[in-house]
Image: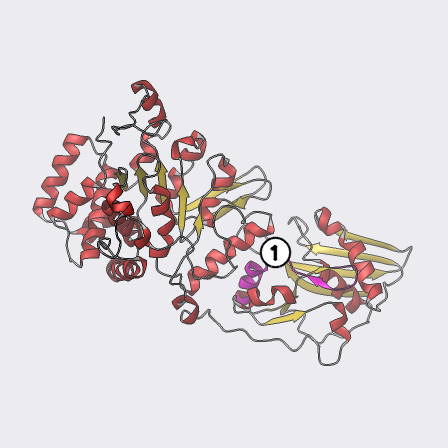
Amino acid sequence: MGFAQVLSRAQAGLAAPLVTVEVHLGSGLPTFSIVGLPAAAVKESRERVRAALATCGFELPAGRITVNLAPADLPKEGGRYDLPIAIGILLASGQIETTFDPAGTEFYGELGLTGELKPVPGLLLAALHARQAGHAVVVPQANARDVLAAGAPVRALAGLADLTEEGMGLQHCVAAPADLPDGDVAAGATAHAGGDLADVRGQHQAKRALLLTAAGGHSLLLRGPPGSGKTMLAQRLPGLLPPLNGAQMLEVAAILAVAQSVGAGTGPGPQRSPVSALPPFRAPHHTASAHAIVGGGVAVQPGEVSLAHHGVLFLDELPEFDRRVLESLREPLESGRISVVRANQRAEYPAAFLLVAAMNPCPCGRHGLVRPPCRCQPAQRERYRQRVSGPLLDRIDIQLQIGPVPPEALVGDKEAAPEAGPDSARARELVQAARQRQNDRQGCLNARLAAGQTLAACRPDAASVRLLALAADRRGLSARAQHRVLRVARSIADLDGREGVIETDVGEALALRLEDSTD
């Protein structure tokens, strides 16, 4: 008889609860049982472990082998438990010695039939929790680089054969730095795959709105005819955002690790390395379901709103999205978090993203243009716009109507007539300075100000208050809309380096929230 315990972790949303792999060797007919609510992939560990032990020269003990994954009521999924099960069997049978701290070392890895360790998705999250517990982690070599970012001591194994090689004992763990450096990695995040803002010709007001969106963390709706540059502008927004700091990088990487562990996380937008200083950019297709956007499914995986955390969520052709999908954005836009509840699971994910949406003025996209003229009936235009509800529009800070780019701006000599406004590098410097003012003043971006903080942070003068009151009366602005106008005005003042909000700031913020003027 023999007994051994090995530590590992499961995954439940952004939590990684500790799992104790208990192995008991008893007498009786040869059996190999795994209990503790294992999924199908975990039950199949028996065959992988059996073949891997034989290939690497170890013996599968005769008799009854019982593996318990405690706690028993926590679902266990994936191939990450192969290595701890194999280590437990070898320890219980005395085929290897305990050269590590069993109470402070966690094991992860999927075994191949030849004993090699295959990479496991989602280990960064487990390593972050291991670091908080003061544990070391043993992972496949393919996972070592990503897991090192978590700051836990890491030991990488190529396979079970490493356990028998001289000098490869598990007591030799590589210590990782306590925190991710903000220096070289973050400083190198000065470009984004979306391109440079200087490439956009014309659309000076739209570029100003983009700068304000980045500076204050505001949501933005661009409405204009096809080919006016809406998508091009949205793709350049991540390049205006400051690089993520160490804590933000790990938070974004943990969400991506959770998504990848359940088969999501890839999809629209440039593919990211697990730990990157570049803000994420997500652009789901308009046929995406509500589960894909806000999260859900059998495993309660994060949706696009969480994968865009600290980055940009771009919804092109906004009215073409399902109404239920658009309405599901209202809560995360307000709170910056999303709680996904299912019959047997609940998970809460961060969702502090910049929403950028684009839409045409009508189904044909020609409304307001002279040539060729729009042929849509007024009722058709109204039905098209009603696909986006008033409560959702009320939560969008900047709503801008843009027109087509004039030919002279599009094909003119760029050197003879340089574009007005900064390029992405200069714009990013302005955004960083504005965000620093906000953090020094209130500890958050202007878009995240609570209702009670808005007046204290904005400090509007008397003329600004009168202008806002007049606009609210004439246009029927809700209390939420008035607060959002003030927050945009605060961002305008921060970009221009002013301490308080003045009348021109409120006037510009109101101009950036105008409804369609072409009716």
Q: Nearer the viewer, residue 309 or 282?
A: 282
The residue depicted at 23 percent of the width and 26 percent of the height is 519
Q: Vertically, is 75 above or below 427?
A: above
Residue 353 as seen in the image, left or right of residue 451: right
Is 119 in the magenta?
yes
Q: Nearer the viewer, residue 369 or 453?
A: 369
Q: Vertically, is 196 above or below 150?
A: above
Residue 40 as seen in the image, left or right of residue 417: right
Relative image position of residue 302 (x, y in whole percent) = 51, 46
Occupied quadrant, residue 380: top left
Q: Secondary structure at mark 1?
A: loop
Residue kind at label 1, given as amino acid type: Pro
Is 114 in the magenta?
yes
- Segment tinted magenta in the rendering: 112-131
Q: Which residue is mark 1?
A: 121
Screen quadrant of the N terminus: bottom right
> Residue 12: in sight, yes or no?
no
The residue depicted at 60 percent of the width and 40 percent of the height is 298
Relative image position of residue 321 (x, y in whole percent) = 44, 33
Relative image position of residue 181 (x, y in whole percent) = 44, 71
